[in-house]
Amino acid sequence: MIRTEVTSMTVPDRLPARMRMDGRTIFQQIKNYFDTENKEYFKHPNTYDGISMHLEPNILTSMEHFDLTGFHCECKDFQNQGVCKHWVAMDLYFRSLPQAIQERIGKASHKPSFASQLIPTLPSDELQDELVEEKAVVPSLSLHGQVEIRNHSIAWTLKLQVEQASRAYVIKDIAHFIFLIFQKEDYFVSQKIGTIRLSLDQFNQASQNLLLYIKKYFIDRNEHSYFNFSYGISPRDCGRYLETPVSYLNDLVPLFQALDVFQYVTSKAEYPLIFLDDSPFIPEEEIFKVVKSNNHYEIINTAYFGFIIQEKLWIRHNHFHIIKEEHRYFLDKLATWIYHYQESSPLIFSQENKAELMQICNIISNYVPISLPDELQIHDFIPTFAFSKTRNEIALNMVWSFGEKQVHSKQDLLTLPYTYQASKARKIYHQLLSAGFKEEFHSLSKIKIVDFFLKELPRFRTLGQVQLDESLEKLLVEDPAVIDIFDDEGFLSVQFDFSMISEDEIEKAIQALWNQESHYQTKQGKVLVFDDESLKVAQSLQDLRAKFSDGKIKMHKSRAFSLSETFKDNEHINFSRDFKKMAYDLTHPEEFDIKPYEVKAKLRSYQKEGVKWLSMLDHYHFGGILADDMGLGKTLQTITLLEANLKPDQKALILAPASLLYNWKEEFRKFVPHKQVEVAYSSKTERIKQIEKSATITITSYPSFRSDLKHYQKQSYDYLILDEAQMIKNSQTKTAQALREFDVKTCYALSGTPIENRLEEIWSIFQIVLPGLLPSKKEFSKLSPQLVAKLIQPFVLRRKKDEVLTELPELSEHLYSNELSSSQKTLYLAQLRRMQEMVSGASAYEIKRHKIEILAGLTRLRQICNTPALFLEDYKGDSGKMDSLFELLDTIREKGSRPLIFSQFTSMLDLIEQELEKKEMSHFKITGQTPSDKRQEMVNLFNQGEKDCFLISLKAGGTGLNLTGADTVILCDLWWNPAVEMQAIGRSHRLGQTKQVDVYRLITLGTIEEKIQELQESKKELFNTVLEGQESRSNLSVDDIKEILGVE
């Protein structure tokens, strides 16, 4: 178990009374165990582990952390809850010591932790890159629900499902569980899982909705007077069953059924759904029938009736039917008759009691079908409601049609030779009263015309046929709006056209629709009723972040593709010709016509398509991300774009890593030598002079741009090119902030790996490249990878080598294994045991809270796999990997091949360099300290055949460099993220390479390097999280850490 820092000596107030009492008993037994006068006893130890004292078999602590910091106990209470009776005893013992001794112990407790000693010895930049940003670490939780009938009551139970747990756990006290959630306190789940800190946001949305409702239920009913969340008063035991009145079913059933798992349990069956309504059941078998015998009729129960609880709820199988108040007494008596008196007291009716029989049959038919003889059959009818407008009232004339026979009054009903549907008649009468009419066939109502049209008219239409006279028809406008969408000065405008509404009221009508109101009433009294389709369109526009202002609906033009996709099947929407052309170009960029260009290179077909795509975006003033695989010529495509589209009076600014500045200048010289190109990279004074030259093309580094922002803002640039744009993946950096402030017409990002770890990285790039395309960061975090892929699809172009460069030489990847030397193994196993002890038995919460320390320890293990000499200056032992590397180099040299050697650790490159010099192997070396112009010079010389090999720091030279002079790539140490390795390999395996490229990954057997290799496989499709809308893991998870360390 990871030792947790405890900053307070105070034992929590909410400890169980029994735990406090037992703790006092232990304290009485041990308080005289030590001689507190022995000052040497409290002397601060020199070793990290400190002096251990055993107060009882179950207690172990360190003297320098006697204030319970690092306290560890083997008892179950401490393992599960993080506190126990032994902790109480330790606290009481500390308090009993003289004040002077307490102070000495307190001072002694500030010894640096293992992490604080370990971390400074690691390379800060490498460690920082491995640390993944973590939010507050909490396990994902969800609820499972169940309902049953206990003692004629509705009893709900809950189970807690913890992320990745094999089963859900019954919540034994629902009230207390709810209390702990809203107090954000600890909850003991099980012996296996232990204790977790609860909070509402840990749960999925369906569970959150239910928890909020149950909390409100307790508070509103005042069922537990102690349940006061404001003052944090803990409730007494409530039990596992939440028993609720029938009146709460309409709320609780949907909430419970929305959970991942729900079931209604009876003694005979389990149902995954409950059907709750007030409409008739449709049972599979007949339940009642009326049998005629001689001069009487008898009602017979022929099948399972179900049961009634609280006289309000009729349950039959998994149908829950809330009984109308007027029928409760009758149905309760009927159920009593079925189960207690059916045989001894049959329901028999004479011919004279036929009316009473039909009344009972009508009530029963409200709930279940009942079989009747022909003379008692219930006949259906179709009502017609004819409405007309008088001066201040609405008149109704109603007719019921029984086939060819029509009924115009209640009196006519009495003359019918058969029975009509009483339940349907009651619904009609109820609707008449609701609309202000009487329960008559001819009646008047003073209802407001708006209320009639919006509320009552739709209800009448569900009951029968509706007819409106001419005066009412003129007042009711139900025609759907005609919607036009067109390009409007850089924005997309949406226009709603409502028939029969004057121009001067259109704006107010659109405002009402935008506000999701059901209607708009004109000055003339007309009522414009918004149909569901128009309301959906308005809501969809708001979802696409359209804005309504000054009577117009506008949205960012970049959402044209999303807009056309959303409304492509809507027949009421008209897209303008310009809009259709833009939407077509966004989806067919390969057909876009581009301007002639003069470039001293023969572009491949896919590169021409890339230039067309970039030019199409430029035409519509859109930015984008060219995300082609490394080595496919993103630089050439960009230079061609600028050559074709850059006007004589226009300028472009290119930002790139310092190592690539002169590479860009060289590419311009090679392909478009007539372009005026300046590299603004030297002292600040020199850079300003270069900026003020106003060259057609200015190239600078990201840090220089940030430093010189004010000077660049004084210039006017039409194009901004961001090379290796993953450099701005963090939106919080000063560089990203400076770029967001920089005004430019069109911006493009170039990156073979626009996403390396997290989805937010693509958000950061698009905030600069195409602001307005994506929502706020908070809203963006809620989007699925599939939706993000759909939003950015037209503005990202990615091609892979194996798709477009079929003639590119083969890339052959090899795992080149080695074993730890004996001296390496000793150090490795000691470090591994220490790491395993840290992680073994720790909860996910503890592991994530100590992630910096854990990752630091993992980095140390990786260094040992290379050679312990990376951190031990006096290490004289062997290194299996170093031996293996130079064996491989000998083989490569014999073949006449020239390798690139990459390592994360610059100190590893230094050691390799020393050995190369001993073997008289010539080499170049690039690290973060190598000047930019010097890098390009070395690259050019190496590609021309100079030197045997090239040593490169993975971070400093893993991007942008063109090193096709090498046909072998050696990766000395594996990186957590395979995207970085892909970039490194792309330095050699790229356009212009004529030889097969061999890649060797050096892996030390039996170590975490094998686990890292497996982990990389799960991350290799990281780009597809967004670029293809597929799920992928991007962070080092708790399971990853445990798997790497071999901990169960």
Image (tube, rainbow, N blue to C red):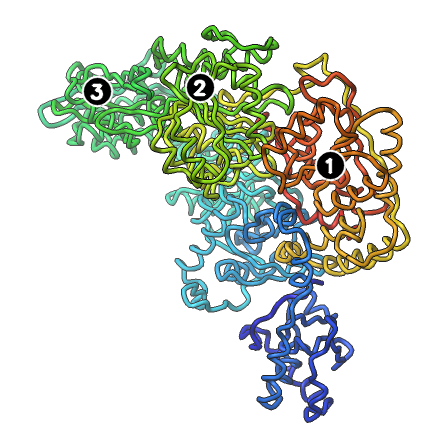
Q: Nearer the viewer, mark 2 or mark 3?
A: 2
Residue that carries the numbered disc 2 in the rendered image: 561
Dot 1 falls on a residue whose secondary structure is strand
Nearer to the camera, 326 or 842: 842
Residue that carries the numbered disc 1 in the rendered image: 951
Label 3 near label 2: C-beta < 8 Å? Answer: no
Is residue 34 visible to us here?
Answer: yes
- Residue farthest along the right direction in this orientation: 822
Q: Position of residue 354 (x, y in %)?
A: 40, 31
Nearer to the camera, 248 or 521: 521
Q: Position of residue 36 (x, y in %)?
A: 68, 91
Label 3 near label 1: C-beta < 8 Å? Answer: no
Residue that carries the numbered disc 3 in the rendered image: 476
- Where residue 808 sits, quadrant-wise, is top right
The numbered mark, 2 or 1, whose residue comes first in the sequence reads 2
Label 2 amino acid? Phe
Residue count near mark 1 (Cα–Cα under 10 Å), binned few <14, some 14–19, many ≥20: many
Q: Position of residue 761 (x, y in %)?
A: 53, 36
- Where residue 101 sits, quadrant-wise, is bottom right
The numbered mark, 1 or 3, whose residue comes first in the sequence reads 3
- Where residue 666 sits, quadrant-wise, is top right
